[in-house]
Image: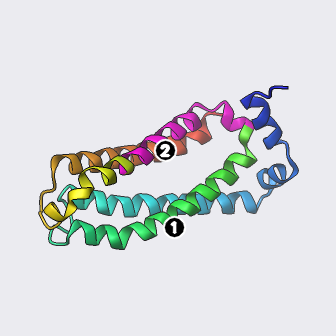
């Protein structure tokens, strides 16, 4: 027997814990608030590194040093964002299935995940050659620009989810 993605989302939506979270006047807003704060942490820390790559801030600080100090906090924020995001999806899976803003957000999240992978496995491998340069290579600036654009679009799409019921 084959189950469609929508049927799975509907089943998930109708489980007891999902219903309890969705209908809770306390827990749902707490989870949603933590999700928002985690996104703020991720976007804020990513923006610092991206702005350094663009040569707009911390020009005298090596890129590798900024990354070493910022990325552990980014990963903690990302873990919290992912956990709370999954809980929010779990509690409203059927509604999310039909929501175009939610679908767009998932696509954008996939793209924003590919960006640093490509960056770290290509141009960042030679960071020792341009680490202290006030102007980073064009591909590093492109990755930073894409990152800032994608994260901005994710925030907008995430906010739009509430308006596409």
Which residue is labeled 1 in the image?
76
Q: Position of residue 138 (x, y in %)?
A: 16, 47
From the image, which quarter does the C terminus lie in?
top right
Q: Main secondary structure of the magenta part?
A: helix
Residue occupying image coordinates x 28% and y 47%: 143
Q: Which mark is residue 109?
A: 2
Q: Is residue 114 magenta?
A: yes
Q: Identify the image quadrant of residue 54.
A: bottom left
Residue occupying image coordinates x 72% and y 57%: 28
Residue occupying image coordinates x 39% and y 44%: 150
Left or right of 153? Residue 121 is left
As drawn, 88 above or below 104:
below
Residue 156 visible in image: no
Q: Position of residue 132 (x, y in %)?
A: 14, 67
Local secondary structure at mark 1: helix
Local secondary structure at mark 2: helix
- Counting residues from the N terminus, which is met first, the one under dot 2 or under dot 1? 1
Left or right of 94? Residue 155 is left
Between the residue at mark 2 and the residue at mark 1, the CA separation in whole angstroms equals: 17 Å
From the image, which quarter does the N terminus lie in?
top right
Left or right of 33? Residue 66 is left
Its colouring scheme is rainbow
Q: Which mark is residue 29?
A: none
> Magenta segment, which residues?
94-116
Residue occupying image coordinates x 75% and y 48%: 91
Observer-nearest residue: 2 or 146?
Answer: 2
Q: Identify the image quadrant of residue 95.
A: top right
Q: Position of residue 45 (x, y in %)?
A: 38, 64
Q: Is residue 7 magenta?
A: no
């Amino acid at each position: 027997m084959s189950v469609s993605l929508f049927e799975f989302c509907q089943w998930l939506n109708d489980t007891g814990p999902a219903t309890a979270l969705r209908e809770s006047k306390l827990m749902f807003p707490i989870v949603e608030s933590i999700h928002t704060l985690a996104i703020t942490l991720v976007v804020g820390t990513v923006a610092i590194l991206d702005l350094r790559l663009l040569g707009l801030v911390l020009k005298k600080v090596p890129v590798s040093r900024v990354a070493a100090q910022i990325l552990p906090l980014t990963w903690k924020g990302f873990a919290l964002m992912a956990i709370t995001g999954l809980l929010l999806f779990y509690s409203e899976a059927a509604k999310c299935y039909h929501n175009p803003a939610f679908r767009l957000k998932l696509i954008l999240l996939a793209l924003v995940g590919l960006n640093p992978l490509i960056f770290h496995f290509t141009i960042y491998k030679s960071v020792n050659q341009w680490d202290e340069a006030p102007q980073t290579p064009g591909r590093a600036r492109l990755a930073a620009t894409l990152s800032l654009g994608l994260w901005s679009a994710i925030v907008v799409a995430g906010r739009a989810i509430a308006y596409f019921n």
